[in-house]
Image: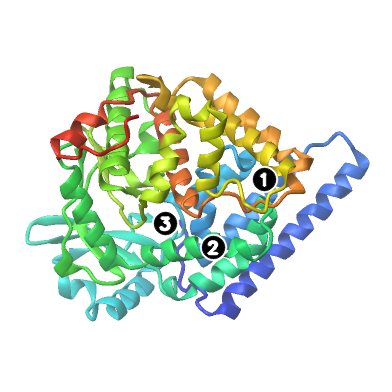
C-alpha cells in the first residue's frame, strides 16, 4: 500500500483537500445527470460508488476526525447506501500508513527518542493503519509488543475537522437551531478523549481488570512506562480481525461461543461498570487460534449516567413500551419528546419511536436471540427506508434524544452487526452471573 510522507495539519491545508474532494463530487453529479438525461431509467448506484470512492480517498489522506466520522457512519449499515458502507468501513483498519521517515520523526517528537533507542527491535513499516493512529511491531526484553503511534496533527485539528463535517451531518439528520450544538460537542469531547493515549491506557487497564473473569475473553497487557500522550505500547496479540474470521468456515458452535462472549462483555460493561467500549467495529477485535475473543482498543469509552441508563433500559421492557402513559413519560425523560412539541409532533414521534424500539429491543425480550435471523435485519432495513423517505419527517426538527444516544446507539448497532457477522445465537441473560460474581446487585432486571 502506498505510504504518506506528509499529512495536512493546518486548517487551510485540510480545507483545501476537502474542497478538491467537493469538486470531484460535483463532477460526478454532472456526469450522472448527463447520463440520466439520455437514459431516465438509470439508477444512482454508479453515482454512489463514485462519490463514496472520492470522499474516502479525500478523507484517508487527511486521517483524523473526519475519517473517524466516516468509520462511525459505516457501522450503521441501514443509514448509508452500500457503496458508502463498503468504502467507509475501510477506515476501521486499512488506510495508507505514514512512511518510515515520517514515523521516525513523529515518534521522536512524541517520545523524545527514536524507536531504536527504546525498543530492541522496531518494524519501520506499520502492520495496521486506521483513522487516528497506526501500529508497529516491536520487541523489548524478549516480549513481542504492539506500538500505536498517533498521526501528527490529529488532536489539534478535531474542532476544524468537525466544522467541515457539520453541514453534511445537519442535512443528513435534519438538525435545526442552536440545540444541535450539544450533539457536536459530544462527538468532539469523545474524539478529544480518543487522542489522549494516557487516558486510553488507564481505561484499558481498568476494563481489563474488571472483565478478566468473563470466559473466552482476552486482553493485551499495557506498558505505561513505554507509553505517552500520543504513543501506546502493549502486548502483541496474534489473531484474525473479526471481519476476516467471519469470512472463514467456522462452526455454529464457535460462532455462538464468540458471540456469547461478546454479548456478555458488553452487557457487563453496560449494567455493571456503567461505562462501555463504544467503538465495536471489527478492527478492534481479534479471534485467536484457540477461538478466543481478543479486545485490543479502548480509546472510546462512554460513561452511562443514571438519568439516561434508567429510562433507556426501562424501554427495553415490553410492559413499559406497551403502556402508553409510561412510554410517553420515558420519551420525555430521554428528550425524544420535547416540551415545545405540537400535539401532532408528540403523536408522530411517539408512534415512530414505538415502532423503532419495539424492533431494536427484540434481543432483550427473549431468553435467546439468533442474530443471523435475516428477517430481523430485513425489518431494520425496511424501517430505515420507510422513515428516510418520509416527507413529513423531513419537515420536523431532527433534534431528538439525549446526547447520550449518539454513542450508546452506536454501541448497540456495532454490537448487533458483529453478532450478525458471527451468525451467533446468544443467551441474552447469561451476563447476569458475571455481574453477580463481581458483586453488582443493582443492575437492570432485563
Q: Residues within 10 Å of mark 2 (few under 14, many from 20)?
A: some
Residue highlighted by disc 2: 182
Task: Give the SS element for disc 2.
Answer: helix
Q: Is residue 419 above or below residue 283?
A: above
Q: In this view, which residue lies farthest toward the front?
A: 325
Q: Nearer the viewer, mark 1 or mark 2?
A: 2
Residue highlighted by disc 1: 49
Task: Give the SS element for disc 1.
Answer: helix
| Precedes in sequence: disc 1 or disc 3 | 1
Q: Is residue 262 left or right of residue 227?
A: right
Q: Name the foreground residue: 262 vs 253.
A: 262
Residue 288: image location, x then y, percent: 23, 36
Residue 54: image location, x then y, percent: 64, 56
Residue 43: image location, x then y, percent: 79, 37
Q: Is residue 235 left or right of residue 44?
A: left
Q: Is residue 409 above or below residue 381?
A: below
Instruction: Answer whether labels 1 and 2 touch (C-beta < 8 Å).
Output: no
| Quarter of the figure with the N terminus | bottom left
| Quarter of the figure with the C terminus | top left
Amino acid at each position: 500500500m502506498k505510504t504518506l510522507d506528509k499529512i495536512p495539519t493546518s486548517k487551510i491545508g485540510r480545507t483545501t483537500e476537502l474542497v478538491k474532494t467537493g469538486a470531484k463530487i460535483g463532477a460526478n453529479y454532472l456526469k450522472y445527470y448527463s447520463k440520466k438525461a439520455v437514459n431516465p431509467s438509470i439508477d444512482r448506484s454508479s453515482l454512489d460508488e463514485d462519490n463514496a470512492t472520492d470522499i474516502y480517498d479525500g478523507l484517508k489522506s487527511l486521517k483524523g476526525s473526519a475519517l473517524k466520522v466516516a468509520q462511525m457512519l459505516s457501522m450503521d449499515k441501514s443509514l448509508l447506501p452500500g457503496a458508502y458502507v463498503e468504502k467507509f468501513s475501510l477506515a476501521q483498519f486499512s488506510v495508507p500508513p505514514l512512511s518510515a521517515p515520517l514515523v521516525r520523526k513523529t515518534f521522536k517528537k512524541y517520545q523524545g527518542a527514536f524507536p531504536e533507542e527504546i525498543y530492541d527491535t522496531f518494524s519501520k513499516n506499520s502492520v495496521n493503519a486506521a483513522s487516528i493512529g497506526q501500529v508497529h511491531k516491536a520487541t523489548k526484553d524478549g516480549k513481542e509488543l504492539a506500538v500505536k503511534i498517533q498521526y501528527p496533527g490529529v488532536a489539534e485539528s478535531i474542532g476544524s475537522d468537525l466544522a467541515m463535517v457539520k453541514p453534511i451531518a445537519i442535512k443528513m439528520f435534519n438538525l435545526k437551531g442552536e440545540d444541535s450544538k450539544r450533539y457536536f460537542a459530544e462527538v468532539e469531547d469523545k474524539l478529544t478523549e480518543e487522542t489522549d493515549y494516557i487516558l486510553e491506557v488507564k481505561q484499558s487497564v481498568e476494563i481489563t481488570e474488571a472483565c478478566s473473569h468473563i470466559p473466552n475473553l482476552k486482553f493485551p497487557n499495557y506498558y505505561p512506562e513505554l507509553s505517552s500522550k500520543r504513543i501506546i505500547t502493549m502486548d502483541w496479540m496474534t489473531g484474525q480481525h473479526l471481519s476476516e474470521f467471519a469470512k472463514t468456515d467456522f462452526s455454529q458452535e464457535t460462532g455462538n461461543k464468540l458471540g456469547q462472549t461478546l454479548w456478555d462483555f458488553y452487557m457487563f460493561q453496560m449494567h455493571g461498570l456503567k461505562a462501555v467500549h463504544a467503538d465495536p467495529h471489527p478492527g478492534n477485535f481479534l479471534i485467536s487460534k484457540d477461538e478466543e475473543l481478543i479486545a485490543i482498543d479502548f480509546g472510546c469509552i462512554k460513561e452511562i449516567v443514571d438519568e439516561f441508563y434508567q429510562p433507556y433500559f426501562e424501554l427495553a421492557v415490553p410492559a413499559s413500551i406497551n403502556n402508553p402513559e409510561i412510554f410517553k413519560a420515558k420519551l420525555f425523560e430521554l428528550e425524544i419528546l420535547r416540551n415545545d412539541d405540537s400535539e401532532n409532533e408528540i403523536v408522530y414521534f411517539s408512534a415512530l419511536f414505538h415502532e423503532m424500539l419495539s424492533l431494536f429491543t427484540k434481543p432483550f425480550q427473549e431468553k435467546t436471540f439468533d442474530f443471523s435471523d435475516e428477517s430481523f435485519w430485513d425489518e431494520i432495513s425496511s424501517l430505515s427506508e420507510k422513515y428516510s423517505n418520509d416527507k413529513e419527517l423531513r419537515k420536523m426538527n431532527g433534534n431528538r434524544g439525549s446526547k447520550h444516544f449518539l454513542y450508546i446507539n452506536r454501541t448497540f448497532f456495532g454490537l448487533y452487526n458483529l453478532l450478525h457477522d458471527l451468525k451467533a445465537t446468544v443467551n441474552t441473560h447469561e451476563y447476569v452471573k458475571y455481574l453477580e460474581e463481581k458483586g453488582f446487585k443493582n443492575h437492570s432486571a432485563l
